[in-house]
Image (cartoon, grey):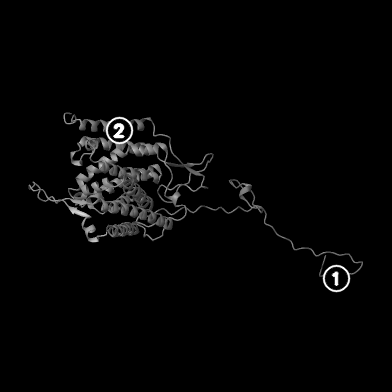
Amino acid sequence: MSSDVPIRPGEPFDPPTPPEVIRPEPLPSVPGDTLTPAQRDAEGEPLPVVYPVPAEPARPGAAPLLLQPPHPGLGFAALWSVAFLMVTYGALIAVLIVALLVQAVMAGDIQAYLQSLVEVEEAPDQPTADQSVKPPLKISPSLGQAIGVSILAAEVASVIFALLIIRLVVGAGWRRKLALYRPSVAQIVLTVLSLPAFLILPAGIHELVKKVLPSMMDENMQVMQEMFGQWPLWLGILAIGVGPGLGEELWCRGFLGRGLVARWGWTAGVLWTSLLFGLLHVDPAYAAVTAAMGLWLHFVYLTTRSLWASILLHTLNNSTAVVAARFAHDPALQAIDKPADQIPWQVYVAAALLLTAVGWALYRCRGRLVPASGGTGPAWHPAFPGAEYPPPDSGTVVARPLWPGWLASAAVILALAALVGVIWLAETGRLAGL
């Protein structure tokens, strides 16, 4: 032991007294003091209480920043949509030019090949009552195939662009935040059961809308359907069904919808998202129709808490058009596939009832945030409105009922039976006599 005090032989050694440590007395327990020993430190002082800072709620109309969470507001959503269109149509035009150049070089006579791409059918010798009808265009099979490949390439480009922007803006965990998870069996069945009404009602809406809004696609719809019928079925389903189903749902419901619902609330956010979804289709009349369809697609997405559900419905809707174009000359299909102005109003009413019944059943089967098994605390909730899934360590899971219940299920079955019955009566000519 070392010491600064010299030690002489024979003298006892007294070590210096250490300084006295003064400790505060523990706080006495007073009446009404509810602190437990676990809430005090070793000296009896109360431990500091850390209160969680509540997440700031979304403020409608808040000034958006490019990467401000959850992601851009209305202004930047519109700019992002312009970029989405530029990527899609840019890829389509680029691939189409390359495909036509390759076919022209392989044909040998480039000028003759280019002249054979599009032909105008001769007008009938006898004048028709409607002199404004233009002679229809006839697209050659080679041009039709090139357009099909170009559309498929454009859809691939749009899906890649959507995924890149989602990863950039939404960030890590984007699949969880966009709810890119499988829906329940009941939700899948209900989503598919809404398809007949989802096909019929937009046709009626388009018939009404085109009376006040111009439509550029109506003049060439027959040409487009004939072109779809020339494609291999797999190409049509991929280019017209799967591609838009993936790309547009990732972009509109997943990316734009998440930000707009978070910033503007459920109602206004869904309306703004559906409007942008419609505007992506450019044509005024079809933009109005697709905006209305976007309302139902967004409802399916939010109630199922699964982006795959809206992707499935979107893909089925578009693929049905491809299959109908492929078998347009089948007498059985011609008997069912009527122009919108020839569909009785009773069919539209039955379709609306089916969509209402399915909507109620989907709401009954909606995904809910609940504490995990064995948990007792409150369930986790996202900072913004939306379909976001809970983090893995949040102690919260998404629970979905196995089925919507007897009453809602009966309503769906009766509404579906009513729609089938009304269509059968209309096709057999018995509806007019009722």
Spatial CA distance of label 2 from label 1 is 106 Å
At label 2, the amino acid type is Leu
Between circles 2 and 1, the one closer to the viewer is 2
Classify 10 Å Cα crowding around label 1: few (below 14), some (14-19), many (20 and above): few
The residue nearer to you, when weighing 273 against 180, is 180
Residue 245: image x %, image y %? Answer: 35, 47
The residue nearer to you, when weighing 259 against 44, is 259
Task: Report the disc number at residue 265.
Answer: none
The residue nearer to you, when weighing 12 against 323, is 323
Q: How many marks?
A: 2
Locate residue 7 relative to residue 64 in the image: left or right: right
Residue 61: image x %, image y %? Answer: 34, 57
State whether residue 390 appears in this view: yes
Circle 2 residue: 416
Q: Residue at x 21, y 47 (%)?
A: 222
Residue 277: image x %, image y %? Answer: 31, 51
Picture quarter with the N terminus: bottom right
Dot 2: what SS? helix
At label 1, the amino acid type is Pro
Residue 319: image x %, image y %? Answer: 31, 44
Classify 10 Å Cα crowding around label 2: few (below 14), some (14-19), many (20 and above): many
Circle 1 residue: 6
Q: Residue at x 29, y 54 (%)?
A: 146
Dot 1: what SS? loop
Q: Quadrant of residue 59?
A: bottom left
